[in-house]
Amino acid sequence: MHAERIEGKWIADFVEVFQLCKVKPGEVAAILSETQSRPLLADLAELALTQLGLEVFHVRLPSPRIQEAVPLRSTGTSLAIKGLEPVIQALSNSQFIVDCTVEGLLHSVERNALLSKGARIMMISNEHPEILERVKPSVETHRKSMIGGQLITAASTMRVTSEAGTDLTVDLSNVQGRGSAGIADQPGSFGYWPAGLCICYPSNGSVNGTIVLDRGDLNLTFKRYLESPVIFHFENDFITHIEGNGLDAELIRSYYANWQEREAYAISHVGWGMAKGARWDSMIMYDKRDTNGTEQRAFAGNFLFSTGANPAAGRFTSCHFDYPMRNCTISLDGNVVVEKGVLQGELA
Ligand SMILES: [Fe+2]
């Protein structure tokens, strides 16, 4: 896309977002990156934090060797730290950690250890900064996202339908909902940019029905808009078969087939997007190397579901797909929170 250079406007954007995270002069901030990170993001973080009067240091790790026959993308699970205790110590003893790893620390095994002493983590998605500039966290989206998370926690059933044929039921008994719009302002909190989601990890055996991915829905592992329908049949969390004659279905079946374990085919998280500034259609404007698709995870009113690891159900696998969908209706115990892709009531 455009040149990857430092722009004053992007330093100002990073300053603004770090101020939302309530960084203070004199705090110690660590910037974590790896050799395959986008160097511009780590530089912008450093310039913004020093401008704000923090004491800053960098931790830069070699990007790890890939473990699978297929490339892993958009997993939110950085493998870069490899459990190294000196790295965990250096980071967790800081007050603020800026995560510029390629995949991000969101689902990494080290996440809890890094947060355990009160450090807050701000994960910067691996995007060209123009995307970050367009989709900044907002306090209002943060507030509404937390309400949505509470609605999920309070509900006992989620139902998702669409004119394309989706009809999915999720038993939400004892499920913890979460809402976040990417602001890490409390000790031990985790934020990410871009953001704006209400999600949960369904518990074991709670997801049944059919999902019809329609033309224009997204497969963010492939960073691709679907051009032909793909139909997933779920029984007690697991995809039993994948229908579809188009290239999309063929590529999806082929990618899943890399994994022998059944967990690859199980539900990971379900929820919906909350970010008003995020757009469904903007990914068409960027080369794949310029986007991680995080904006499309968050666009307001999407239904976002994924397959792969689900800690609440005790399932682990490195296969992960995120599928944001348009035009779905989502209800919680019969109360519609998203109608045909539009946020309703107090979430709107
Ligand atoms: Fe995901």
Image (spheres, rainbow, N blue to C red):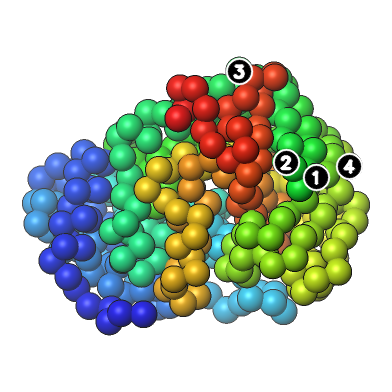
Residue in the picture at 45% in, 54% down: 279
Say if disc 3 is inside 8 Å of ligand 1: no
Which residue is under mark 2? 162
Q: For mark 2, does the 10 Å Cα neighbourhood hold few (<14), some (14 to 19), or many (20 or more) residues?
A: many
Is 41 left, or right, of 148 in this rendering? left
Above or below: residue 175 compared with residue 11: above
Q: Which residue is mark 1?
A: 165
Residue 1: where, in percent of width, then height? 36, 80
Task: Report helix, strand or loop for mark 4.
Answer: strand
Q: Secondary structure at mark 1?
A: loop
The label shown at residue 154 is 3
Q: Which residue is mark 4?
A: 235
Near mark 1 (Cα within 10 A), the count class, few <14, some 14-19 or many ≥20, is some
Q: For this rendering, which residue is in front, 276 or 103? A: 276
Q: Nearer the viewer, mark 4 or mark 2?
A: 2
As measured in the structure, the alpha-carbon distance from the residue carrying label 4 to the one carrying label 3 is 24 Å
Mark earlier in primary sequence (4, 2): 2
Query: Label 1 sits on what residue type?
Result: Gly
Q: Residue at x 44, y 72 (%)?
A: 286
Element marked by disc 2: strand
| Structural distance between the alpha carbons of marks 2 and 1 | 5 Å
Mark 4 / mark 3, whichever is N-terminal: 3
Cα gap from disc 1 to disc 3, whole angstroms:
27 Å
Amino acid on which disc 2 is placed: Ser
Q: Residues within 10 Å of mark 4 (few under 14, many from 20)?
A: some
